[in-house]
Structure formats: C-alpha cells, structure tokens
Image: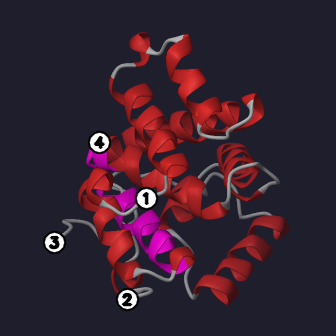
C-alpha cells in the first residue's frame, strides 16, 4: 500500500491555477475514462511541464501513425515490464486489455510478452522496443531491417523508437517520484 495519498511522493505545490484548457482536458478524461490519470495530476503542478508532457503523449499515442493504438500500448507495456514500472504496467496493461478485448493478452503482456500469441509483426516490434530499452548501443541496421521485413515503414520505425523512448523516460520519472496508478485501473477491462 502506498505511503502517500498524492499521485507522487514529492511535495509539488501547484504554481498557478490550472488553465481553462487543462480543466477541460481533465473533464474530458473524467468523461471518457471515469478518472483523471494520476500522471496528469502529477504533471499539473507546472503548466509548462503539463503541456509538454501531454503534447508529446498525445502525439505519440493518439496521432495518425502506421502503428495502431493497440500496438503503441503494447510497446508501453513491454518497455514498462523491462523497467518494472508499476504505474505504467497498471495503466497501460488496462489499455491493452481494453483495446484488444482480451484480458489474458493484457496480463501476458505485463508478465512476459514473449509467451503471448502475437503476430510476427507485433513480435518484431516488441523485440526491437525491448532491445532499445535494454541495450540501445547494440541496435544495428539488421534490427531496423527486421522491422522492415515485418512490414514496418521507416516512419513506423521512427514511431516505435519514439514510443519506446517516451516510456523509458516516463518509467524513470514514475520510479523516482513513487507515482501510483489510479486504483480504478486494476479492475478495468477484465
């Protein structure tokens, strides 16, 4: 059980009142998700940091891409499993369950994506994301070519790398601040 009730263990005083846009964003989250994700609450102590985080997240996870939303969430979970990020495994594991309609897939992804029944495309994508997380200096042209051979374009490879990098950063911030997921995530899409 968390020793703190706040989304993070740091005492971060909000610098200014939330902007109208941020309040509207929170209201949209509450309407669509039934909650305001604690990661957003955590970043809201500073409007500039909140805006930067949400802009990058929305671009990587929601904008047009050759990667499906499910594939991007799968990358988030595979990276977070390597990094043992409780927040992201809980939140993005729920997203995989919801987007796939398969609670078992969500759990397998959290525990070990290698035992999940994945397409060759998904397996190549996740193998690349995990290698980039664990051993970035070992990424070679052969790794990029394996993604091309699995049907990914060079733009898709950029997106795979960017989503991987974003979640490595997010995992480290979550670990450093003891960020906790909203309790509601635990029961979603089961």
Viewer-proximal residue among 28 and 190 = 190
Mark positioned earlier in the residue sequence (2 or 3): 3
Viewer-proximal residue among 100 and 38 = 100
Q: Position of residue 14 (x, y in %)?
A: 58, 56
Looking at the rendered image, the disc whose residue lies closer to the viewer, 4 or 3, is 4
In magenta stretch: residue 82: yes
Q: Position of residue 54 (x, y in %)?
A: 69, 53
* Residue holding disc 4: 82
62, above or below 164, in the image = below
What whole-number distance in Å separates the C-alpha atoms at marks 4 and 2? Answer: 23 Å
- Which element carries disc 2, helix, strand or loop? loop
Number of marks: 4
* Residue holding disc 2: 190
Image disc number at residue 118? 1
C-beta proximity under 8 Å, tags 4 and 1: no
Quadrant for residue 151, please give it. top right
Image disc number at residue 1? 3
- Which element carries disc 4, helix, strand or loop? helix
Looking at the rendered image, the disc whose residue lies closer to the viewer, 2 or 1, is 1
In magenta stretch: residue 147: no
Give the color scheme: rainbow, by chain, secondary structure or one colour.
Answer: secondary structure
C-beta proximity under 8 Å, tags 1 and 3: no
Mark positioned earlier in the residue sequence (4 or 3): 3
Instruction: Count residues near mark 2 (Cα–Cα under 10 Å), then give few for <14, some for 14-19, many for 20+.
Output: few
Looking at the rendered image, the disc whose residue lies closer to the viewer, 4 or 1, is 1
Q: Position of residue 85 (x, y in %)?
A: 31, 51
Q: Is residue 44 left or right of residue 136?
A: right
What whole-number distance in Å separates the C-alpha atoms at marks 2 and 1? Answer: 20 Å
State the extent of the magenta-drawn residues as a range.
81-98
Instruction: Count residues near mark 1 (Cα–Cα under 10 Å), then give few for <14, some for 14-19, many for 20+.
Output: few
Image disc number at residue 32? none
- Which element carries disc 3, helix, strand or loop? loop
């Amino acid at each position: 059980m968390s020793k703190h009730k706040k989304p993070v263990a740091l005492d971060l005083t909000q610098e200014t009142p939330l902007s109208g846009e941020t309040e509207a964003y929170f209201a949209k989250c509450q309407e669509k998700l039934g909650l305001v994700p604690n990661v957003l609450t955590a970043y809201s102590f500073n409007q500039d940091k909140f805006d930067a985080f949400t802009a990058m997240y929305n671009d990587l996870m929601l904008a047009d891409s050759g990667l499906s939303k499910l594939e991007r969430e799968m990358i988030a979970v595979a990276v977070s499993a390597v990094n043992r990020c409780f927040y992201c495994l809980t939140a993005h594991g729920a997203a995989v369950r919801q987007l796939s309609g398969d609670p078992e897939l969500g759990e397998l992804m959290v525990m070990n994506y290698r035992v999940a029944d994945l397409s060759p495309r998904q397996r190549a994508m996740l193998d690349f994301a995990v290698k980039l997380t664990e051993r970035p200096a070992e990424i070679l042209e052969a790794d990029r070519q394996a993604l091309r051979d699995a049907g990914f374009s060079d733009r898709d490879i950029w997106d795979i790398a960017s989503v991987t990098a974003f979640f490595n950063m997010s995992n480290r911030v979550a670990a450093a601040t003891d960020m906790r997921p909203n309790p509601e995530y635990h029961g979603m899409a089961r």
